[in-house]
Image: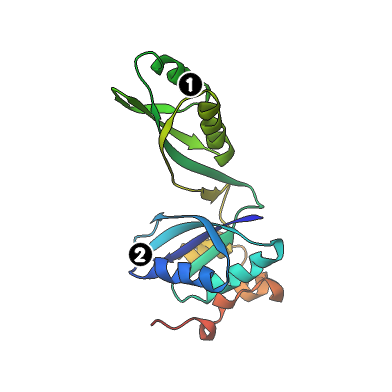
Amino acid sequence: MLHTFVALVSDKPGVLTRVASLFRRLNINIVSLTVGESERADVSRMTIVCEAPDHAAHRIRASLYKLEITVDVDEVGRSEAVIRELCLIKVAAGPKTRSQIFELATVFKARVVDLAPESVMLEMTGAASKIEGLIQVLTESGYTILEVSRTGRMAMRRGHHTSRVLKALGTPDHDHSDQTSFLEKHEADEILPNEFTDVHEKEE
């Protein structure tokens, strides 16, 4: 099954290589991986989609936490989250077929971002299934798809962060009514390896 992890990692050279090497060692295939800036200047946000057995999710999270460059890891595939993907599709089109492609784009809420004498480029943001639906309809309608570029999933939880995530982000927790420590808030089996400094993987 597919698992979606959102990892906040240090923004420095070699981070992407270390994460990819970790999945290689675990013998788990990365389906898609997107990296970009986060709300913090020194932290990047990774959205990692991988194919692994159901029981492997905890092992993947624990392994990511062992990397010293990891700030926080969250699996969002099973919780309420906004998950989107950006796709650019270039379709062969002449004067006689453009209008039909424009109609399909309207139905799927895609945008025409480039128009050339022999092609039309569509931009679409949405769920992966919706993007695949547009590609399938274009193919079945006899149009020639020249190029497809997809970002892979980008995900973010709905609603407010938990105090644990706020702590990982370095953001003050404004709920002053509860002054108990982090260890008192979580059961022992919920504490992952990065809560202990001696299990971090050393920098090479």
Q: How many C-alpha atoms fall within 10 Å of the one at disc 2: few (<14), some, or many (≥20)?
A: few
Kindly identify the residue that appears in the image at 54 percent across and 83 percent down: 199
Q: How is the image coloured?
A: rainbow
Which amino acid type is shown beneath numbered disc 2? Asp
Which amino acid type is shown beneath numbered disc 1? Thr
Q: Is 124 or 173 nearer to us in this picture? A: 124
What is the number of callouts on the image? 2
Kindly identify the residue that appears in the image at 47 percent across and 71 percent down: 21
Looking at the image, residue 12 sits to the left or right of residue 202; the answer is left
Residue that lies at the very extreme toward the bottom in this rendered image: 198
Q: Earlier in the sequence, mark 1 or mark 2?
A: 2
> Which residue is the site of mark 1?
106
Question: Is there any visible trace of residue 169 in the rendered image?
Answer: yes
What's the distance in space between the residues labelled 1 and 2, CA to CA?
A: 40 Å
Kindly identify the residue that appears in the image at 45 percent across and 41 percent down: 86
Identify the image quadrant of the C terminus.
Answer: bottom left
Residue that lies at the very extreme toward the left in this rendered image: 117
Badge 1 marks a residue whose secondary structure is: helix
Rendered view: 46 above or below 12: above
Q: Position of residue 178 (x, y in %)?
A: 62, 65
Residue 3: quadrant of the picture: bottom right
Q: Position of residue 156 (x, y in %)?
A: 53, 50
Give the mark toward the camera: 1 or 2: 1
> Which residue is the site of mark 2?
42
Q: Position of residue 67 (x, y in %)?
A: 49, 75
Q: Is 118 or 23 nearer to us in this picture? A: 118
Kindly identify the residue that appears in the image at 55 percent across and 32 percent down: 136
Rendered view: 5 above or below 153: below
